[in-house]
């Protein structure tokens, strides 16, 4: 078991919160953390999906999982989430800002304000609000400090065609990660970012028939098991708080990311 150096709850287990933890990459991360001995809280908007995931992962790992419904883009909902975390667990050692959403490829001029706002709310505002509340808890808990890991996606550096809202939010996550890492120094709060390329999830299933490329063609792209991403997050989380992976990219080796479009 690779526990972080930040601290543990009264029963000796570190506490982790994974947003968007009921499906996809978030569920894979929650599984890896639970199997490693963390007390894991998963959150998302659909309580039925969350509870089913928590029950399934508890049965698979023998670990401790708690499902709490929340809309990370709503300040009052995030405040209520962290009130439960603080009251029930007493501390938070790891926050994984994983919740995110996108659109099928939409031309820039066809994106509605409502579509833009929804993506910004979940992908960026949600990560900020959760980080803000994590700071408040991590600064005052004993032992002090903790770790925050943001899901940046490779769209944090390189866009796909017709993906302006998603790409803009993921570029912004890089700035949030750096600011969090800087502002957390004096309080033993470490922050890093994992950029993920083509992990196999429900979201990537729609890519099976091919996705648009920068040169105007459509191509089927390789994918990787989301467990590889989860293992990378587990490594990042296992470090003592005086060490940090600021950025890491985990991707399918043969996906058309490195090179010219």
Image (spheres, rainbow, N blue to C red):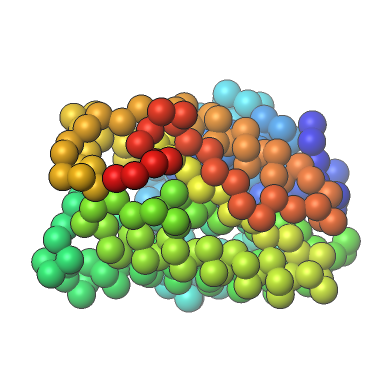
- Identity of the residue drawn at 35% across and 60% down: 167
Q: Position of residue 85 (x, y in %)?
A: 65, 60
Give the total number of marks visible in the rendering: 0
Q: Which is nearer the eye, 50 or 131?
A: 131
Q: Is residue 44 left or right of residue 90?
A: left
Q: Residue placed farthest to the right in the image? A: 143
- Identity of the residue drawn at 20% across and 75% down: 113
- Identity of the residue drawn at 44% across and 64% down: 171
Residue 87 visible to the viewer: no
Q: Is residue 41 left or right of residue 218?
A: right
Where is 237 relative to 230, above or below? below
- Identity of the residue drawn at 11% across and 66% down: 110
Q: Which is nearer the eye, 202 or 216?
A: 216
Q: Which quarter of the rendered picture does the N terminus lie within?
A: top right
Q: Position of residue 240 (x, y in %)?
A: 83, 49
Q: Position of residue 52 (x, y in %)?
A: 44, 36
Q: Which is nearer the eye, 173 or 132?
A: 173
Residue 228 visible to the viewer: yes
Q: Which quarter of the rendered picture does the C terminus lie within?
A: top left
Q: Residue placed farthest to the front in the image? A: 260
The answer to which quarter of the image holds residue 33 is top right
Q: Position of residue 227 (x, y in %)?
A: 53, 29
Q: Residue placed farthest to the top in the image? A: 60
Where is 256 relative to 125, above or below? above
């Amino acid at each position: 078991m690779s526990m972080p150096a930040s601290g543990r709850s009264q029963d000796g287990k570190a506490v982790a919160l994974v947003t968007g933890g009921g499906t996809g990459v978030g569920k894979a991360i929650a599984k890896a953390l639970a199997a490693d001995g963390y007390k894991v809280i998963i959150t998302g908007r659909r309580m039925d999906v969350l509870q089913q995931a928590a029950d399934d992962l508890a049965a698979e790992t023998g670990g401790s999982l708690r499902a709490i419904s929340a809309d990370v883009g709503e300040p009052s909902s995030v405040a209520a989430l962290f009130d439960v975390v603080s009251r029930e667990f007493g501390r938070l050692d790891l926050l994984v800002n994983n919740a995110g959403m996108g659109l099928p490829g939409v031309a820039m001029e066809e994106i509605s304000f409502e579509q833009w706002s929804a993506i910004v709310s979940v992908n960026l505002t949600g990560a900020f609000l959760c980080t803000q509340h994590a700071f408040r808890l991590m600064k005052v808990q004993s032992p002090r400090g903790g770790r925050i890991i943001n899901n940046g996606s490779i769209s944090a550096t390189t866009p796909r065609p017709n993906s302006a809202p998603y790409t803009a939010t993921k570029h912004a996550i890089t700035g949030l990660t750096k600011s969090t890492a800087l502002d957390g120094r004096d309080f033993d709060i470490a922050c890093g970012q994992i950029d993920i390329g083509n992990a196999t999830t429900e979201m990537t299933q729609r890519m099976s028939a091919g996705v648009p490329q920068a040169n105007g063609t459509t191509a089927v792209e390789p994918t990787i098991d989301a467990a590889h991403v989860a293992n990378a997050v587990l490594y990042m989380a296992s470090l003592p708080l005086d060490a940090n992976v600021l950025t890491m990219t985990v991707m399918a080796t043969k996906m058309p990311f490195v090179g010219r479009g």
